[in-house]
Amino acid sequence: MAFIDFNDSLKVVRNIKISSYRTKIVKLSDSLDYILANDIVAFESSPLAPTSAMDGYAFKYKENVDRLKIGGINPAGSKDIFEIKNSECIKTFTGSLMPKGSDTLIPIENVKVLDDEIEIILSVKKGSHVREIGENYAKNELLISNGTKIDFPQIGVMASLNISTVNVYKKPIVGIFATGSELLDVGEEQTSFSQIRSSNHFIIEAIVKKYGGEALRFGCIKDDKESISAMMGKALKQSDIVVTTGGVSVGDYDFVKDVIREMDFEVLFQGVNLKPGQHIMLARKGDKFILGLPGFAYSSTVTALIYLLPLMGKFINYSTTLTNIKATMLEAYTKKSNKTEFIACNYYLEEGKYKIDFAHKKQGTSAILTNILGNSALMMLNPTDKIKNIGDEVDILIF
């Protein structure tokens, strides 16, 4: 299968549809960061009746009135509903129902109390400081749409509607393992200089958790076909998406791509005109997916951010992608390939505009994971881009 254009590979992912969504019911207090699986519609108005917005005195507005008799006190939550009489006011508190016949509230600080009367020091307009019926929301109003990520505002609104449990999309389960006979897992003893400490499965696990999935980390697997095949089968039984790192290139021991094909998965693409990560593979069988990423740490991280995030979003009816913004070059950059490239850069917000440079970013292979430490982003250059000069505007992805 020939390498495809980067934009064509993104189109393949965008066009993926799964056969059915899985949902579950969670407590409202546990719903943070889940994706809502149904619309939230107001079953009543809020407030249900005119309500005081401040502590003060409720009265029926009339121009040129400077004194009013205090006819009673109306605490918040009181079941007794006062009725205003002519030239009378009722002391009313924030959240209290407005007395019958009243239409205006004058704040406490605007009056002077004289025995059983108030003297109006600073007048207000008719209707001031009154919350009308439905000010917050009206009955049958759509408040939160299906597919919304639940954050504290959504939790607050649902609590105000007395919603104690929420229907949400189940998070996709992503199984992760790294391939390579040279790899050591964290905690394993190094016995040879040829051994390399694997970080891929840890960083991809963190990416999955950060962007709304559940991760199953299966560790490191040696470069033999039987081990890879056994682990792939195990991971697929427990996961919606299996992510592997290594074994998708053209080396003698790159068996992952062969195992994927032998499992009768449909290969959606294998190889993208991309740097880093050109040897990338995406395959599907029903609603199960295998994403084969390169073995180098920077490559696997970049490609996971680009491809795994939108793939995860398919399972939760949510667009999970990195934020793309425009930024101005503070340093020149010369591109040497004819591929779409993602280059680690530093980004800053100065005077309302984003700017980037490459200070302390090391030149070398796509194994330099430390290049994404700090306030880093990914500068994206198209295949036709060659030289970017100081002051040029470029696209960057923020993670």
Image (cartoon, rainbow, N blue to C red):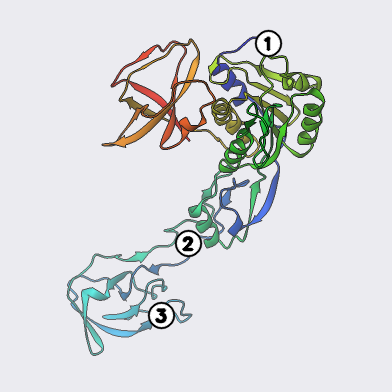
Front residue of 106/166: it is 166
Which residue is at 80% across, 28% downward?
227
- Say whether residue 337 is left or right of residue 236: left
The residue under label 1 is 1
Which residue is at 41% across, 13% downward?
385
Cα gap from disc 3 to disc 1, whole angstroms: 75 Å
Could you say which quadrant of the image residue 5 lies in? Answer: top right
Q: Which element type, helix, strand or loop, lies under badge 2? A: loop
Which residue is at 50% across, 13% downward?
339
Q: What label does residue 46 carry, if any?
A: 2
Front residue of 143/133: it is 143
The residue under label 3 is 75
Q: Work out whether mark 3 precedes mark 2 in sequence or the reverse, and give the earlier one.
A: 2
User: Which amino acid type corresponds to the residue marked 3 in the rendered image?
Assistant: Pro
| Number of residues whose C-alpha sits closer than 10 Å to that of mark 3, classed few (under 14), some (14–19) or many (20 or more) | some
- Say whether residue 303 is left or right of residue 359: right
Could you say which quadrant of the image residue 219 lies in? Answer: top right
Cα gap from disc 3 to disc 2, whole angstroms: 19 Å
Residue 201 visible in the displayed image = yes
Q: Which element type, helix, strand or loop, lies under badge 1? A: loop
Residue 323 visible in the displayed image = no
- Say whether residue 41 is left or right of residue 385: right
| Number of residues whose C-alpha sits closer than 10 Å to that of mark 2, classed few (under 14), some (14–19) or many (20 or more) | many
User: Which amino acid type corresponds to the residue marked 1 in the rendered image?
Assistant: Met
Screen quadrant of the N terminus: top right
